[in-house]
Amino acid sequence: MKIYADNAATTKMSRTAIDAMIPYMESVYGNPSSLYEIGQDAREALEDARRRTAALIGSSDPSTIIFTSGGSEADNQALLSGAELGRLKGKMHIISTKFEHHAVLHSLKRLEKAGFEVTLLDVHEDGLIRPSELEAAIRPDTCLVSVMYANNEIGTIQPIREIGKICRDKGVIFHTDAVQAVGHIPVDVEKDNIDMLSASAHKFHGPKGTGFLYARKGVRLTSLIEGGAQERMKRAGTENVPGIMSMTAALEESCSRMSEDSKTLTALRDRLIEGLSRIPHSVLNGDPVKRLPGNVNFCFEGIEGESLLLLLDDKGISASSGSACTSGSLDPSHVLLAIGRIHDVAHGSLRLSLSEDATPEEVEYIIQAVSEVVAYLRGFSPVWRDLTSGKKEFIL
Ligand SMILES: *Cc1c(COP(=O)(O)O)cnc(C)c1O
């Protein structure tokens, strides 16, 4: 059996998304900035996509959408813009959280070097921040708050509406990295009190290299790329029309199927959690309920996540571990450390992110495979031997 269970990393493009792309490569290939017909046809399509995209996240104003190369670019632009607006008013303090995506955390590092002060809120063991702690952290010189909608590793969904309300009341700009949320759970920029939001097509069955940034009217964006006058001079470069059309179709499809999909997916997720919880000395990371419909994340004591992944790959399962060993470092995931997992435990992590096409048979296969592989690896793990012989104490 071949099972792709790494949909938080990227998703397979849907047929709808692929089909939506083709006309803009084969026939309507004009440059949207050109004045002749084929260019203007592309322009019309682009503006139609902007209107539809805005509507899908609850904005009635198409000019609030800037198309980008993806989630990372949108995050970078949002943070830089919020910071620049702050600098103009002499407000140089930014609040975010310890478990943001690196697109946010590394942008914050850069802003710190440029003279901003950054407060990173603690994430509690349930994978959630506390709005009261955010409220207490806001100062007169706070210009920007950035809190992710749903976490990409442990899938926890933050109380965004409440967070947005606090920021709105205090007059602080609120950005949310909603890359894992858009297309998966209901997102409404108006109701959620969001000023800026980042999204990425390849996380909801659209193409890679395409995304968007929402910025409420009145939130002035700083451009990252200088050049032509595209995207209201906020993002130069000829627009990726095929990608944008495809993303819009993918988002429409995901949103129209959302309530049905999330019901079946949540049931599969909960069965997977139940099955994996039977493995001794294991723990589910993140709140069991306030989490994305397809996200399951566990730590198993006494094993290495990397070995687990390799053996699961042999069994046909594509999954992910929290640790960043692929990037050449052996540091455990900053997300798992942020929720209080100690190094040893955080190393034995496994993220399974299911797609809407997942089946009950696949879930049973995964439970069986993970249980076998964990037991096998513990069989020759020195750490496990120390734990079972009482030399070391179990944490989980
Ligand atoms: C994937 C992801 C990103 C980056 O998006 P890209 O389109 O790959 O640049 C940012 N934030 C979160 C939460 C993500 O999951």
Image: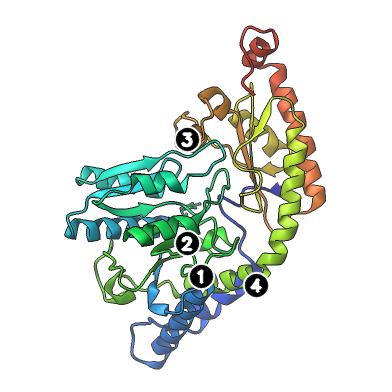
Tell me which amino acid carries mark 1. Ile
Give the mark, 3 or 2, whose residue is nearer the N terminus.
2
Q: Residue at x 70, y 62 (%)?
A: 261
Q: How far apart are marks 1 and 4 (CA)?
A: 12 Å
Which residue is label 2 attached to?
199
Crowd class of label 2 (few under 14; some 14 to 19; many from 20; radius 10 Å): many
Give the mark, 3 or 1, whose residue is nearer the N terminus.
1
Which SS class for mark 4? helix
Which SS class for mark 3? helix
Which residue is label 3 attached to?
338
Tell me which amino acid carries mark 3. Ala
Give the mark, 2 or 1, whose residue is nearer the N terminus.
1
Q: Distance between the residues labelled 3 and 1?
A: 29 Å
Tell me which amino acid carries mark 2. Ala
Which residue is label 1 attached to?
57
Q: Of the numbered discs in the image, which one, if any, rests on residue 385?
A: none
- Is the C-beta separation of discs 4 and 3 under 8 Å? no
Q: Of the numbered discs in the image, which one, if any, rests on residue 256?
A: 4
Give the mark, 1 or 4, whose residue is nearer the N terminus.
1
Tell me which amino acid carries mark 4. Ser
Which SS class for mark 2? strand
Q: Residue at x 50, y 31 (%)?
A: 332
